[in-house]
Each structure stands twice: as structure tokens, then as C-alpha cells.
Amino acid sequence: MESPITVLLLRGHDRYWEEARACLAAIGCRVEVFDGPLFRLEATISALQPDVIMVAADAMERGTLESICLFGTALPRPMVVFRVRHESLRNLHAELEALKQRLAGREAVDAAKRLLMQEGLSESEAHARLRWLSMDAGITKAEAARRLLQRSRRT
């Protein structure tokens, strides 16, 4: 039986490193975290003999990188440097989805107002009708507009 790959996470203390740690452990890696003073890094690398060292570039201090480079000649190890950006990407995706929902809601409201205006209401009357429908049903104007449009499609 092969021994597990040992991964050393440097400065691995935020939730993303916890996720990385859990994923690596799930595939059978032995995961160690070093978050101590840099003067102990060489001793830690010597003691653990990691197969791979992972470093978060966003949290990496200049001293950390210099220490790893110095130890790299004496204790050569593959090193993986990550830039943690997925939270900002996740936030952007969530914001984009929220904007899409708002736009779809506005488009539904505009379409419902056009439908009501075809029935002879003015734009302000159509808007007031949608507002009344939404308040009466306890839903958003966009949802009231969608329901109105669905009813008109059925008839």
C-alpha cells in the first residue's frame, strides 16, 4: 500500500484553506498546516518531509516567499501557489444573478403594463393596477406581472 501524499499548507487558516484541507484529506492526502513563525519553517519541512507545499499568494508575506526559496535549495519540494479569488468571483456571480432577476422582473412589469394599456388603461393606471395586484396578493410587482401575463396567455 502506498503512503499518502503529504501536503503542507502554509499560512492555512481561513475557510478556503479549510475547504482545501478537507478536499485533500478526502482524496487520501495527509494534510499539515504551518502557521508558525518563519524561523521554524525549515524545521517543520525537515520533520514532515511534505511531498508538496501549498501557499496562498494573497496572504503570503515577502518573508514567507524568501524563506521558502532559501529552504528550497536545501529541502527541494514542489510548491503550489494559489491566489484566492473565488470569493470575489462568487460574489460577482451572485450580483450578476440578482441583476438578471431584477431585469427579468422589470421586463415582466413592462410587458404586463403594455398588456393592460392594450385594454385601454393609461401607463399610470396600468402601473397602479399592478401595484394593487401585488399588494392584494402579498407578492412583488414582478410576480404579479408574471401571473397576469400567464393568465392572459391561457385565454
Image (tube, helix red, strand yellow):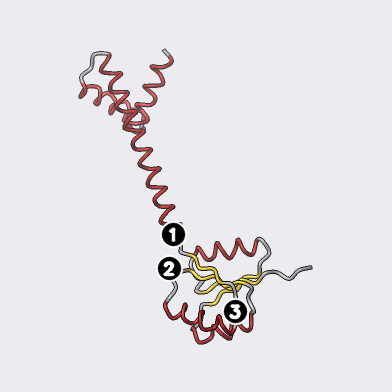
**What is the three-letter code of the residue carrying label 2?**
Asp
Earlier-in-chain disc, 2 versus 1: 2
Q: Which residue is mark 3?
A: 76
Q: CA distance from mark 1 to mark 3?
A: 28 Å
Q: Position of residue 45 (x, y in %)?
A: 59, 81
Crowding around mark 3 (Cα neighbors within 10 Å: few <14, some 14 to 19, many 20+) is some
Earlier-in-chain disc, 1 versus 3: 3
Q: Which mark is residue 85?
A: 1
Q: Quadrant of the N terminus?
A: bottom right
What residue is shown at x 35% (from left), y 41% (from top)? Answer: 99
Q: CA distance from mark 2 to mark 3?
A: 23 Å
What residue is shown at x 54% (from left), y 77% (from top)? Answer: 34
Q: Nearer the viewer, mark 2 or mark 3?
A: 3
Q: Which residue is mark 2?
A: 58
Earlier-in-chain disc, 2 versus 3: 2
Q: Quadrant of the C terminus?
A: top left
Q: CA distance from mark 2 to mark 1?
A: 9 Å
Question: Is 133 left or right of 32, judged from the image as shown?
Answer: left
Q: Position of residue 134 (x, y in %)?
A: 33, 29
**What is the three-letter code of the residue carrying label 3?**
Pro
Q: Nearer the viewer, mark 1 or mark 3?
A: 3
Question: Is 53 left or right of 28, judged from the image as shown?
Answer: left
Q: Position of residue 4 (x, y in %)?
A: 70, 69
Asked if the residue at tag 1 contacts the one at tag 2, i.e. Cβ–Cβ closer than 8 Å, the answer is yes
Q: Which mark is residue 59?
A: none
Report helix, strand or loop for mark 1: loop
Q: Residue furthest front?
A: 73
